[in-house]
Image (tube, rainbow, N blue to C red):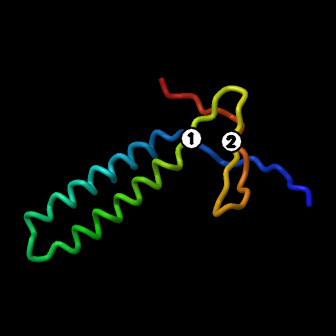
Amino acid sequence: MAMKEREAISSSGWLAIVLGLGSLAVAVYAVAQIRHHQQDPLPYVVAGGALFLVGVTVLRGNFVVGPNEARVLTFFGKYAGTVKTEVAMPS
């Protein structure tokens, strides 16, 4: 079965980097609040863990496409598209 190449949608990853690092920072802050709320720490543990997973997932999705390069995107192991163009950094 022949596979047809599709152009994937991509954009600059600066917003994703800011959101990923921000969620990691808030996760650390939420876990640090446990010592102030020792009577009921469960919401802070859950929030910290969830924000940590979100931050790692968002940061893991960033990639660099250099000149004369392409990246293949997969979603749960299935082909989702190919990114061939590099996105210029804002100046």
Q: Which residue is located at x 28 percent, y 57 percent?
A: 27
Q: Which residue is located at x 14 percent, y 76 percent?
A: 40
Q: CA distance from mark 2 to mark 1?
A: 8 Å
Towards the viewer: 38 or 83: 38
Residue 2 horizontal/vertical position (percent): 91, 56
Q: Are marks 2 and 1 in contact (CB under 8 Å)?
A: yes
Residue at the spot of label 1: 63
Amino acid type, callout 1: Phe
Q: Secondary structure at mark 1?
A: loop
Residue 13 horizontal/vertical position (percent): 51, 41
Residue 89 horizontal/vertical position (percent): 52, 28
Residue at the spot of label 2: 71
Which of the 4 image quarters holds residue 18? top left
| Placement of the N terminus among the 4 image quadrants | bottom right
Residue 11 vs 31, above or below: the answer is: above
Q: Which residue is located at x 47 percent, y 23 percent?
A: 91
Amino acid type, callout 2: Arg
The crowd level at tag 1 (other Cα within 10 Å; few <14, some 14-19, many 20+) is: few
Q: Earlier in the sequence, mark 2 or mark 1?
A: 1
Residue 56 vs 45, above or below: the answer is: above
Q: Secondary structure at mark 2?
A: strand
